[in-house]
Amino acid sequence: MKIFKHIFHLIPVVGLGYVGIFLYPEWLNSGYLDDWYPRIGAGIATYGGFVGSLVWYILNNKYF
């Protein structure tokens, strides 16, 4: 049952990592984020969420 706990908590880390690596650069190249404030907001949300989720997972899961 412990594996399901890890999978549940790793879904945001993996999902936001995917968005940050593959989708965010594609949004910039396609012109979807055409002004500066959506670019900054989406970047902060994507990369900040990824880093925050990863740090939370590392700090709160002592036994991998």
Image (cartoon, rainbow, N blue to C red):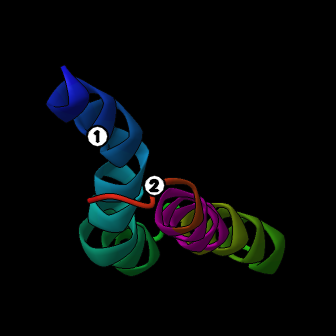
Residue 62: give its label. none
State left or right for residue 20 relative to residue 1: right
Magenta stretch, main secondary structure, is: helix
Residue 40 image offset from top left, x and y in percent: 75, 77
- For residue 21: magenta? no
Q: Is residue 31 above or below residue 61?
A: below
Dot 1 and dot 2 residues touching (CB under 8 Å): yes
Disc 2 marks a residue whose amino acid type is Asn
Q: Residue furthest front?
A: 63
Quadrant housing residue 21: bottom left
Residue at the disc numbered 1: 6
Residue at the spot x=64%, y=65% of the render? 52
Residue 29 image offset from top left, x and y in percent: 36, 80
Q: Is residue 33 visible?
A: no
Q: Say how many tags the image has.
A: 2
State left or right for residue 21 relative to residue 49: left
Q: Which residues are magenta?
A: 48-58
At mark 1, the secondary structure is: helix
Q: Depth check: 3 or 18 in front?
A: 3
Residue 5 image offset from top left, x and y in percent: 32, 29
Q: Depth check: 43 or 47 in front?
A: 47
Disc 1 marks a residue whose amino acid type is His
Q: Is residue 11 visible?
A: yes
Q: Quadrant of the N terminus?
A: top left
Residue at the disc numbered 2: 61
